């Protein structure tokens, strides 16, 4: 038993020693591993090499699409997908990249910018969204497989990324690398959405935002009177946002959109067919195309095949000057297109740089070799293309004429140039920072050995310089450049050739009314026409009419309706008509208010002349009769007919004729008060004299009867008092009328709408009708008395003539009342004058003409014997 226990103890002790040794060995190995391993950041995945590269102290990244179109494999998500196969060479993008290289080399040779430091570049040739995204991530992450630094965020990242030319790809990678605050500068991405600093905190651009371009396009459309337009865009952020901004701005300018269609070059064919059908059957003659050159090429070709021509194209800067339009089958229908592009510039030395390009400068670039072979249609190796001849080695761009070497239209290329200089100036300001005067916390400057992206971002936001060409470069708080455009006109587009003319300028920095200026250059319109096309839903309403909107249609579709009576519209396309001032009336066209015609009975018009003639003739004739009576006052016929009342009657008739003149001429305050009162008083005086003569005749007849003593009650004194009494009553009535409410001049605008009647308002109608009523009362009394005395002997009384005169007088004034009430305007006054003249001439002719006949033509009857003869016959 004891042996067994001893053996078991030895085994336990041995196991314990082995366990301790193993633990010690593990500790030793762990210590050795900790001592030998250095912390590293390892690159995960495969590295995509840049197409063009050069080392430097500061690296600028570039993302361009040297080829358009690609073929990609469908991802299986089981293995890494193969890179896409890019197709057609895009010379413009390659030109952008070479401009970037030129600007970097120019800066490296300039001792005033970044002295003692060199700029390098990594330029990627990327096609397809996935490839572009990968290129951006490579620039943000660096390309070394292992970064032997303690902090993985300090990899060899680019200080800034230049590109892309498209808005959608730029938005995609700017969202990602913007989170790391790496600056992104675009020379061509114009989508207004990129101005959102919350979504794109590190984005800048040297091309204006589409916000300004869309507003400028709306002003352009309005400038030429195109109020009915169709709009087309591609189905991406650039097209959708740009066209939305345009539609909003166009509606503010009073422009209506007939239709909006969108499609993609790579989309289903039915979308393109729908666009073509919409354009074909639309009524608008203007198309605003907010899309890239790829969609324009496809759409123009399809429209050309359907023979849809003669349209006016208005384009965005993404296609309006693109040289690829010359390869389109439908390029002819684009002639006359208008659009805005950034200003043209000249970059000294760029042409020489482009012409010195040679594949030997970039031996690792397959694209440069492909470009060279395509340019000279030769092969640099036997295996590249068996159908092409071998390159001789003497090919050179020095004398080649191509779009690549053409520097006459440097617009977007100049934006690339400015972008490089903007980053260079930002880095220069960062390097030149003086300690304790820096922009960061406590006056610190950036550590040049470990520059953080956000520090470059800060200096880039505040960059402000002027290029050697005199162009100022600065960014606002959203990273946008000032908006300045040239309005260009495609005047000639053929295969391989495009003629572009600058016909105007738009500068958003100027006041609103001075932003748009035309330079007077002749414009070629859509389809090569030389007349401005008309594109309206409804023709403009001329002055004199107003617009009435058509139910269920846009505001640009309307009917033109004449203005109502009394209203005018003096502008084209007036929405409403305006009433003329009270003294004015519309002209026959209804586009202006003219002073209303003022109507009154004038001395100069025919009616006034005729009435004046009869007034004066009546006064003259009465005066002549008075002279005759005065000359023959001692004759029996004058003495037998109460010569005193006859002279008074002749005097009152003269006043009646003359007072008619007060009714003619422009009414005034005095003439209005005088005409009715003078007429009333003179007529009462006249009727009073006639009434006195009638009473005298009756009294004289009765006085001849035996035992009659009536004449003593109606002698000369009583006759004068009766005339005075009758007249004073009328004077009192007139005084009361003038005191209470006298007549006054009045502009009658109710009877005629188109003219003003100047007349005398009665003041109070009671006064006027009281005057007339009193005259009528005396006239009726006189008529009754004269009628009673009508059968008295003719030789010594005139009752029969007075009866006729009163009959005429009453008839005239009875018919006067309805004629006066119903006569319009100046005819009211004419009726009143006619009534005065007719009744006055009636009294004059009936009472005095027979006596004048006897006095002047039958003097044998003007004897006392003749007058007394008939009296005796009656008495017998």
Image (tube, rainbow, N blue to C red):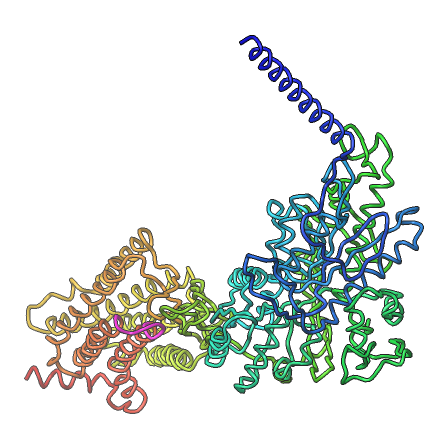
* Image quadrant assignment for residue 105: bottom right
Magenta span:
821-828
771 is higher (above) or lower (below) than 436 = below
* Residue 663 percent coordinates (x, y): 38, 70
Whether the magenta-drawn stretch holds residue 529 is answered as: no
Q: Main secondary structure of the magenta part?
A: helix
Q: Nearer the viewer, residue 287 or 22?
A: 22
Q: Left or right? Give the position of 57 relative to 330.
A: right
26 is higher (above) or lower (below) than 42 = above
Task: Write the residue at 15% across / 72% down.
Answer: 700
For the C terminus, which image quadrant?
bottom left
Q: Left or right? Give the position of 406 relative to 837.
A: right
Task: Write the residue at 19% across / 70% down.
Answer: 779
Whether the magenta-drawn stretch holds residue 822 is answered as: yes
- Residue placed farthest to the top in the image? 2
Q: Nearer the viewer, residue 297 or 520?
A: 297
Residue 717 seen by the camera = no
531 is higher (above) or lower (below) than 745 = below
* Image quadrant assignment for residue 303: bottom right
* Residue 149 percent coordinates (x, y): 78, 38
Residue 608 seen by the camera = yes
């Amino acid at each position: 038993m004891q042996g067994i226990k001893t053996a078991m103890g030895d085994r336990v002790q041995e196991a314990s020693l082995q366990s301790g040794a193993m633990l010690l060995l593990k500790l030793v190995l762990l210590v050795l591993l900790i001592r030998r391993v250095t912390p590293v950041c390892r690159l995960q995945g495969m590295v995509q090499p840049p197409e063009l590269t050069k080392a430097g102290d500061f690296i600028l990244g570039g993302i361009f699409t040297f080829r358009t179109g690609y073929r990609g494999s469908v991802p299986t998500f089981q293995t890494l997908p193969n890179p896409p196969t890019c197709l057609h060479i895009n010379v413009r993008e390659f030109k952008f990249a070479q401009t970037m290289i030129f600007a970097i080399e120019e800066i490296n040779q300039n001792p005033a910018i970044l002295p003692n430091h060199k700029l390098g570049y990594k330029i990627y040739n990327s096609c397809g969204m996935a490839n572009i995204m990968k290129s951006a991530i490579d620039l943000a992450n660096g390309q070394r497989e292992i970064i032997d630094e303690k902090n993985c965020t300090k990899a060899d990242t680019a200080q800034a990324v230049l590109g892309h030319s498209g808005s959608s790809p730029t938005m995609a990678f700017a969202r990602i690398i913007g989170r790391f605050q790496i600056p992104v500068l675009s020379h061509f991405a114009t989508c207004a959405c990129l101005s959102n600093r919350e979504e794109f905190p590190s984005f800048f651009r040297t091309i204006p935002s589409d916000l300004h371009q869309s507003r400028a396009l709306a002003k352009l459309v309005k400038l030429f009177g195109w109020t009915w337009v169709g709009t087309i865009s591609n189905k991406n952020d650039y097209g959708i946002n740009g066209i939305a901004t345009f539609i909003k701005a166009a509606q503010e300018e009073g422009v209506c959109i007939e239709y909006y269609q969108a499609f993609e070059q790579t989309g289903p064919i039915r979308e393109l067919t729908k666009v073509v059908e919409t354009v074909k059957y639309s009524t608008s003659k203007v198309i605003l195309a907010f899309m890239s050159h790829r969609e324009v090429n496809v759409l123009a070709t399809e429209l050309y095949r359907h023979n849809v021509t003669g349209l006016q194209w208005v384009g965005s800067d993404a296609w309006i000057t693109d040289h690829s339009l010359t390869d389109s089958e439908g390029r002819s229908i684009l002639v006359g297109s208008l659009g805005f592009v950034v200003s043209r510039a000249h970059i000294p030395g760029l042409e020489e740089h482009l012409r010195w390009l040679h594949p030997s400068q970039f031996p690792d670039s397959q694209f440069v070799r492909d470009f060279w072979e395509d340019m000279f249609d030769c092969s640099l190796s036997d295996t590249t293309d068996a159908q092409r001849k071998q390159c001789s080695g003497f090919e050179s761009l020095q004398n080649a004429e191509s779009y690549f070497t053409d520097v006459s239209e440097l617009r977007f290329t100049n934006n690339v140039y400015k972008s490089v200089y903007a980053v260079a100036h930002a880095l220069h300001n960062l390097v030149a920072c003086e300690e304790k005067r820096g922009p960061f916390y406590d006056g610190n400057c950036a550590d040049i050995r470990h520059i953080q992206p956000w520090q470059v971002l800060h200096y880039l936001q505040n960059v402000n310089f002027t290029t050697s060409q005199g162009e100022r470069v600065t960014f606002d708080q959203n990273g946008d450049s000032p908006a300045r455009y040239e309005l260009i006109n495609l005047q000639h587009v053929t295969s391989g050739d495009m003629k572009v003319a600058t016909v105007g300028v738009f500068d958003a920095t100027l006041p609103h009314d001075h932003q748009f200026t035309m330079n007077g250059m002749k414009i070629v319109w859509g389809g090569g026409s030389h007349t401005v096309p008309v594109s309206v839903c409804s023709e403009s309403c001329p002055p004199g009419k107003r617009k009435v909107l058509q139910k269920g249609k846009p505001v640009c579709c309307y009917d033109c309706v004449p203005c109502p009576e009394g209203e005018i519209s003096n502008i084209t396309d007036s929405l409403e008509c305006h009433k003329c001032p009270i003294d004015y009336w519309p002209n026959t066209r209804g586009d202006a208010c003219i002073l209303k015609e003022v109507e009154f009975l004038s001395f100069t018009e025919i009616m006034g002349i005729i009435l004046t003639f009869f007034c004066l003739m009546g006064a003259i004739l009465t005066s002549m009769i008075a002279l005759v009576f005065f000359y023959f006052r001692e004759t029996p016929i004058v003495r037998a007919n109460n010569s005193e009342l006859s002279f008074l009657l002749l005097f009152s008739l003269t006043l009646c004729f003359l007072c008619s003149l007060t009714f003619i001429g422009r009414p005034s305050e005095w003439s209005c008060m005088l005409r009715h009162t003078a007429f009333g008083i003179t007529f009462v005086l006249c009727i009073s004299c006639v009434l006195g003569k009638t009473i005298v005749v009756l009294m004289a007849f009765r006085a001849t009867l035996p035992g009659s003593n009536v004449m003593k009650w109606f002698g000369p004194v009583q006759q004068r008092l009766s005339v005075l009494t009758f007249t004073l009553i009328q004077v009192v009535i007139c005084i009361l009328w003038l005191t209470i409410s006298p007549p006054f001049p009045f502009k009658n605008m109710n009877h005629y709408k188109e003219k003003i009647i100047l007349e005398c308002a009665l003041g109070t109608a009671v006064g006027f009708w009281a005057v007339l009523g009193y005259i009528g009362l005396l006239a009726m009394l006189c008529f009754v008395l004269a009628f009673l005395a009508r059968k008295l002997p003719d030789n010594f009384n005139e009752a029969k003539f007075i009866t006729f005169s009163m009959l005429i007088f009453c008839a005239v004034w009875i018919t006067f009342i309805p004629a006066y009430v119903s006569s319009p305007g100046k005819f009211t006054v004419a009726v009143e004058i006619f009534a005065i003249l007719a009744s006055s001439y009636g009294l004059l002719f009936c009472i005095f003409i027979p006596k004048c006949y006897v006095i002047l033509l039958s003097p044998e009857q003007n004897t006392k014997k003749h007058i007394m003869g008939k009296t005796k016959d009656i008495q017998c």
